Image (cartoon, rainbow, N blue to C red):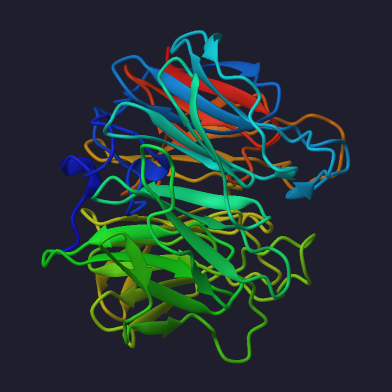
């Protein structure tokens, strides 16, 4: 059975609740610290400020230490990703006050090679933080001082950064340009030197990747191309495709677009299609679907088709809770969130539906079943009138709303949530605002 990231110390990561986006390399998004525990009569509130750029994600390190990764800000009328040859797409890392969100310490501006995209940051077991921004990787200490800088081999923005069980770092490019291959790099954590030659996949691979260690000790990476689910083996610092496990999420007769990230749970890989931005290439016209593939038999596939509105689009993956066996899917463009119970292969039943318009990477408190999602009614509107999105807390079993609070932003738009330290959580948004949402 697939392990749960939140129940065990994840090899390579700092021993905190949330040292990496989604809480662990399997991207299960389950929080191991106590939930908000919202009860009748209690309400949520929020504190916000603008980050000064594109706020990507928060991660936890030591007790009370919360770090924000941010990058250059989009200009009016721009859509990500952007390339500015003048190189003014620098990013940075900062440690913020966990209550006020004010900056405590901040790195200098870090080069990106001119590429503007949401990279990643991780807290390593050695105590340092590693950040991918554009085509650069940086090693920083807890005071956000740069220790090592490394330009990555491909002149492209990189999308995703995970730590493997031996402490090495793995990263890949975004793959948003037609025909652009996917290139993985493995770097050792001391000097950020390449451990092995880059692995090249001759396919456009847009989403971030996940990784899993099986009970037998095999270490795999899962990622999606425009139509397929790909599994790579990691061994002795090297990635390879030496596997007969091959899967496709293509649905015959449907005009689909690429999937984003993968999530691993219940001996299965979960993902959604319809992720390609209309500003990149011709968008698909199909309805939003989710998919399940067995990690032991790639031919075992479930297609979850419950939203049914055409011309779907989403900026991220679904959430799957392996303990309650609940899958949560959504369509950002048309609106709507649906939760289903996974019974067995070929059998999923709808539990509840919501009209909310979610744009964030959802998160779930494992003990209380509090699902953290978003309702952004104006996320897809071109109207300049500011209608702010709200973080919404939902009972994942029943769909009952427990509370909500403003993000002070039109939408989160694909960015990440992070649990806090005492009945609170943190929000990063593409428009740049950051928020602490707390029980008042």
Q: Is residue 309 above or below residue 117?
A: below
Q: Position of residue 433 (x, y in %)?
A: 65, 25
Front-lying residue, 46 or 160: 160
Which of 34/15 is in front? Answer: 15
| Residue at the (56%, 31%) spot, across then down | 428
Snapshot quadrant of residue 296? bottom left
| Depth order, front residue of 87/321 | 87
Query: Which residue of the protein is positioned furthest toward the bottom in this rendering?
Result: 252
* Count of picture labels: 0
Q: Position of residue 368 (x, y in %)?
A: 25, 35
- Residue drawn at the location 84% of the way across and 31% of the way down: 385
Residue 42 to residue 12: above or below: above
Q: Residue at x 62, y 34 (%)?
A: 429
Residue 126 occupies quadrant = top left
Whether residue 176 sits left or right of residue 336 in the image: it is right
Point out residue 300 in the picture as x, y percentages from the top left corner: 31, 85
Observer able to see residue 326? no
Residue displayed at 67% across by 34% down = 111
Q: Would residue 357 be visible to someone looking at this image?
A: yes
Which is more toward the observer, 417 or 178?
A: 178
Q: Is residue 307 above or below residue 211?
A: below
Q: Is residue 264 above or below residue 127?
A: below
Q: Is residue 433 left or right of residue 32?
A: right
């Amino acid at each position: 059975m697939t392990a749960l990231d939140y129940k065990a110390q994840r090899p390579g990561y700092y021993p905190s609740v949330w040292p990496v986006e989604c809480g662990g390399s399997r991207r299960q998004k389950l929080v191991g610290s106590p939930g908000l525990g919202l009860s009748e009569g209690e309400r949520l509130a929020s504190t916000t400020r603008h980050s000064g750029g594109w706020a990507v994600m928060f991660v936890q390190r030591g007790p009370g230490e919360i770090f924000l990764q941010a990058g250059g800000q989009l200009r009016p009328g721009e859509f990500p990703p952007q390339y500015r040859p003048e190189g003014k797409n620098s990013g940075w890392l900062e440690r913020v006050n966990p209550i006020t969100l004010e900056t405590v310490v901040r790195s200098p501006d870090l080069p990106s090679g001119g590429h503007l995209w949401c990279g990643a940051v991780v807290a390593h077991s050695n105590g340092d933080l590693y950040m991918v921004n554009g085509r650069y990787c940086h090693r920083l200490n807890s005071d956000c001082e740069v220790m090592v800088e490394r330009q990555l081999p491909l002149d492209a923005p990189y999308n995703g950064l995970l730590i493997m069980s031996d402490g090495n770092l793995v990263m890949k490019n975004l793959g948003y340009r037609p025909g652009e291959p996917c290139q993985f790099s493995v770097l050792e954590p001391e000097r950020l030197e390449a451990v092995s030659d880059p692995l090249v996949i001759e396919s456009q691979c847009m989403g971030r990747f996940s990784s899993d260690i099986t009970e037998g000790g095999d270490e795999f990476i899962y990622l999606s191309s425009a139509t397929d689910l790909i599994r790579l083996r990691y061994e002795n610092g090297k990635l390879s495709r030496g596997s007969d496990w091959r899967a496709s999420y293509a649905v015959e007769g449907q005009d689909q677009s690429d999937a984003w990230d993968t999530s691993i749970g219940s001996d299965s890989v979960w993902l959604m299609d319809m992720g390609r931005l209309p500003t990149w290439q011709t968008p698909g016209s199909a309805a939003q679907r989710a998919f399940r593939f067995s990690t032991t038999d790639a031919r075992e596939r479930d297609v979850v088709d419950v939203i049914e509105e055409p011309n779907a689009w989403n900026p991220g993956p679904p959430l799957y809770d392996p303990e309650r066996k609940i899958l949560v899917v959504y369509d950002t463009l048309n609106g709507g969130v649906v939760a289903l119970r996974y019974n067995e292969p070929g059998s999923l039943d709808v539990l509840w539906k919501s009209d909310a318009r979610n744009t964030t990477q959802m998160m779930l408190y494992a003990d209380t079943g509090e699902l953290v999602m978003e309702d952004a009614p104006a996320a897809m509107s071109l109207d300049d009138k500011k209608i702010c999105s709200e973080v919404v807390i939902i009972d994942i079993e029943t769909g009952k709303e427990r509370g909500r609070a403003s993000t002070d932003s039109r939408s989160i738009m694909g960015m990440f949530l992070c649990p806090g330290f005492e009945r609170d959580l943190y929000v990063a948004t593409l428009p740049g605002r950051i928020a602490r949402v707390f029980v008042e």
